[in-house]
Image (cartoon, rainbow, N blue to C red):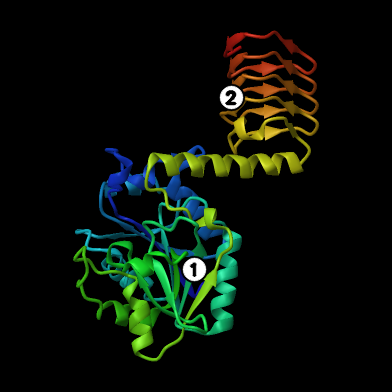
């Protein structure tokens, strides 16, 4: 447990690049709103206190989070990430450190968060920020470091010089900050930038001006900190979570001939030695016994198959119970028997 840490998840933005009437964090990635994946990672990292910053479509966002023990914080006007965190000051009153994350990073893993917490405690710096390296860093804040690797500042894309835009190390948008420093620094942040907003990133420069150490936690897997800002990135995040889940199934004894085209909801159970051909979709809490064979193009929703069942290609079954050893012909359409 990490009772001394409060997580602050930023979920107030509109997400205009999604070209959608729906709040960005509510778009589904691998069967769930993307913000659910972020909150699951926080929970599995043993962080028990969590504040969610909401603004745009806040009622819809909070309605989607009713199963999570969160503290809602309303940001009436979207005046930047720094302003959003400042709104959560009272929600963080009991914390020693504040972990700041974005609600649009569904690929972040709890192991990464736990490693960052351990590094922060070892380094004993007031700020640890997560960075990663990108071949194409366009759109991300660049990390400015000295010749010893200490972080001097983060410069946003729109405020960066041409030389700074060539830097490959980027801000992953996840911070672990000592609470007293965080809120004192945020009250000093101005709006002298191209967006006229309070940038959370400016706390790094403030720490340096005060002679305080700013450490970084470099995460080697850039995909884990992907921010979903478009339908293209949404599809990439979905495919990544799908493959992670499928790899787990294969390690547990399930054969997937084409894991990149096989979609299995996380609430489904697949028995050992079952074989799934390509373009199979299984959802709705379906269960498959051991030694089944599901041929290509099948769709199973809410189904329960005994051991040794064979389902022919392109069959579509919904809410069916299939006895052990049964053979379902190809192109079968069956519902609710």
Q: Is residue 216 above or below residue 320?
A: below
> In the picture provided, is 273 more to the left or to the right than 17?
right
Crowd band around label 1 with a 10 angstrom C-alpha radius: few (<14), some (14–19), many (20+): many
Q: Which element carries disc 1, helix, strand or loop?
A: strand
Q: Is residue 33 left or right of residue 258?
A: left
The residue under label 2 is: 302
**118 lies left or right of 135:** right
Indicate which disc, 2 or 1, sits on the residue closer to the N terminus: 1
Q: Residue furthest bottom?
A: 211
- 149, 296: nearer the viewer: 149
Q: Which percent across, then down, holds residue 270?
A: 71, 32
Label 2 element class:
loop
Residue 166 point in image, percent of width and height:
41, 65
| Rendering coords of residue 302 (x, y %) | 58, 24
Answer above or below: position of 95 versus 174: below
Please identify the quarter of the rendering in which residue 306 is found. top right
Q: Quadrant where the N terminus lies?
A: bottom right
Looking at the image, which residue sits at the far front?
163
Residue 1 showing in the rendered view? no
Of residues 22 and 189, which is closer to you in this image? 189
The residue pinned by badge 1 equals 130
**13 w.r.t. 219: above or below:** above
Residue 7, placed above or below residue 146 = above
């Amino acid at each position: 447990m990490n009772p001394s840490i409060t997580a602050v998840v930023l979920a107030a933005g509109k997400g205009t690049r999604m070209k959608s009437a729906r709040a960005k964090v509510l778009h589904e990635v691998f069967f769930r709103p993307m913000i659910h994946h972020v909150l699951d990672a926080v929970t599995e990292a043993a962080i028990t206190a969590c504040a969610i910053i909401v603004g745009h479509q806040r009622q819809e966002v909070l309605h989607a989070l009713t199963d999570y023990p969160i503290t809602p914080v309303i940001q009436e006007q979207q005046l930047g990430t720094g302003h959003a965190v400042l709104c959560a000051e009272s929600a963080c009153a009991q914390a020693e450190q504040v972990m700041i994350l974005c609600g649009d990073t569904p690929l972040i893993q709890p192991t990464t968060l736990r490693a960052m917490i351990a590094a922060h405690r070892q380094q004993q710096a007031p700020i640890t920020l997560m960075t990663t390296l990108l071949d194409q860093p366009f759109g991300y804040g660049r990390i400015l470091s000295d010749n010893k690797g200490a972080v001097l500042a983060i410069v946003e894309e729109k405020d960066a010089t041409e030389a700074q835009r060539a830097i490959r190390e980027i801000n992953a948008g996840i911070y672990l900050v000592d609470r007293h420093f965080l809120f004192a620094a945020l009250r000093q942040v101005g709006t002298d930038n191209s967006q006229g907003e309070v940038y959370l990133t400016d706390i790094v420069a403030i720490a340096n001006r005060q002679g305080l150490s700013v450490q970084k936690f470099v995460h080697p897997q850039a995909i884990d900190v992907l921010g979903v800002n478009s339908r293209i990135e949404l599809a990439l995040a979905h495919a990544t979570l799908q493959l992670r889940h499928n790899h787990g199934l294969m390690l547990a004894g399930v054969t997937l001939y084409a894991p990149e085209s096989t979609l299995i909801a996380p609430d489904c159970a697949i028995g050992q030695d079952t074989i799934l051909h390509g373009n199979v979709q299984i959802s709705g809490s379906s269960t498959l016994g051991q030694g089944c064979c599901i041929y290509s193009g099948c769709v199973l929703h809410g189904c329960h198959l005994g051991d040794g069942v064979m389902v022919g290609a392109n069959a579509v079954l919904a809410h069916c119970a299939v006895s052990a050893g049964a053979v379902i012909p190809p192109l079968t359409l069956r519902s609710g028997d």
